[in-house]
Amino acid sequence: MTSNPNWFTELSDSGTIFGLELTEAAKIHEEQTPFQKLEIYDTTTFGKLMTLDGCTMVTTRDNFVYHEMMSHPVLFSHPAPKRVCIIGGGDCGTLREVLKHPEVESAIQIDIDERVTRVSEMFFPELCESNNDPRATLAFEDGIAWINNAEPGSLDILIVDSTDPVGPGAVLYSEEFFRGCWRALGENGLLVQQSESPLVHAAKIIKPMHDTMRKAGFSDIQLHQFQQVCYPTGWWSCTIAAKSGSIAFTREATAQTLSFPTSYYNAEIHRGSAALPQFLKAILA
Amino acid sequence: MTSNPNWFTELSDSGTIFGLELTEAAKIHEEQTPFQKLEIYDTTTFGKLMTLDGCTMVTTRDNFVYHEMMSHPVLFSHPAPKRVCIIGGGDCGTLREVLKHPEVESAIQIDIDERVTRVSEMFFPELCESNNDPRATLAFEDGIAWINNAEPGSLDILIVDSTDPVGPGAVLYSEEFFRGCWRALGENGLLVQQSESPLVHAAKIIKPMHDTMRKAGFSDIQLHQFQQVCYPTGWWSCTIAAKSGSIAFTREATAQTLSFPTSYYNAEIHRGSAALPQFLKAILA
């Protein structure tokens, strides 16, 4: 069934394993950045694979789902998404999707590790094709400090394109961080953050995260589900939180006649991904 | 990260691997049936796992998604689903979901391998809890022959809960088989069949399958996506085909006030799972 004995495999703490078959080339890049071990593999069917400290971050084949779902639902929910900030997202795929929206006037991406971006430019050039957009700023510094120092009310959209809530990523799920996000957002401001697997993390991560967001001042919360094959269980989610008022599909008409190409997102997917299965409704109630 | 070196892993021809961590007990049952090798494993986080010839069929933890999506969308799309037939489905999980509908008067499950059902009764008793329902018939014979011999127009719903379209399963994706299904269905009859992974099988399996269904006489086709973690890529689908007319969410009002418990399905999920991502729309156009 497999022509090559080389596989990249990742064990998750949910008792599952996911792996991708590698070409003869196998690992094609490896470096220890000031922050983490960064590796690039060449797979037989998923294109390039980037891992950080052994955890799958992005593949050529399936990153479109994650990047589109981290950007378009939240941007089409805001009446006028002009000022966007991305915390993390060093592979630049989310930035590319954000800049597809003509309404966006400025988008700053703040990833602490510049090497993630530089290596992405080499191995995932398609994700970096908007890095030179005049509206884009690439900053390489601590995103949490940046948020805490941001001018209050200065952002319309804040996208936390972060790692898992373990180790250094744990602070991104804290009430203090969410308070900082709330403060940095303007009147109709929306936050979106990746929120792990509905099947295995609903009670342990998603529910506490939503409770913490509410404690930090967010007035409404909406979960979107999607398939992210290369992440543990392949069943993934992001969570949108509103600074005030309710989350609505505010610019649905614009989404129905998309002015730019997408591979995953459309208006029906926007509505459909917000439908929650019964078990998840019960846990999040 | 893992407490036990035992893992069940399945390589797929899409260049991916999925695995589940096993308890100390590891493999708890193994037999060669007249048709296939049947094994049961005990996993640390997904309960029991059944494999046939090494391929994952069902786990305790995530089978609810598949079984609910193979039954409720099609049953709530039919105005009066009284006579139901399930081809395959020997684990009896689909039968259980079908029999939750009070409108169903008879449901026959036709799996060629009686051992699948007998072993399910031992290790997945919750899936078999409706096997003694007076409306249920369990037949152990060739489902294709059964369909070909069925009285024309004798079924409202036909559920093909089958294996992959390789080897003995290939015939279940043939025009001849679909013609037999079309003939066996009544006026408002609906067929549903599992249709593999939208990410990796859209062009090679799903599109040809839809084309073949149309050639066989089916008038409308609707794909539903869902997450089936234990199947290759975890991104799965089923396809509903109408004998005549269009597929609609005919009994939406009933689905909105469900009279029975579900873990995954609800009316919003019904609509949401029918939303297709852009790339899939393009392939299936």
Image (spheres, coloured by chain):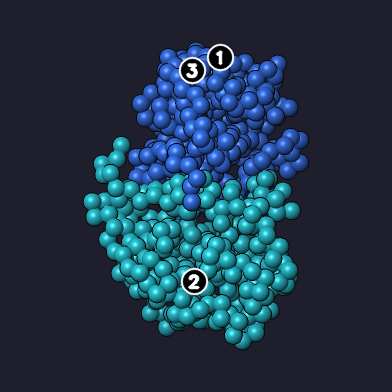
Chain colours: A cyan, B blue
Please tell me whether mark 2 or mark 1 is closer to you in this view.
Answer: 2
What's the residue at 44%, 80% (across, down)?
A: A140
Check disc 3 and report its element: helix, strand or loop.
loop
Please tell me if label 2 and label 3 are on a single chain. Answer: no
Please name the amino acid that badge 1 sits on.
Answer: Ala
Which residue lies under the disc numbered 1? B139
Query: In the figure, residue A79 lies in which quadrant?
Result: bottom right
Please tell me if label 2 and label 1 are on a single chain. Answer: no
Q: State left or right for residue A14 relative to residue A118.
A: right
Image coordinates of residue B254 in percent, x first then y, are 74, 38
Q: Chain of mark 1?
A: B
Using the image, tell me which numbered label, if any, was put on residue B113. 3
Please name the amino acid that badge 3 sits on.
Answer: Asp
Image coordinates of residue A97 in percent, x first then y, are 47, 68
Which residue lies under the disc numbered 2? A88
C-beta proximity under 8 Å, tags 2 and 1: no
C-beta proximity under 8 Å, tags 3 and 1: no
Please name the amino acid that badge 2 sits on.
Answer: Gly
What's the residue at 42%, 35% (across, down)?
A: B209
Marks 2/1: CA–CA distance: 56 Å
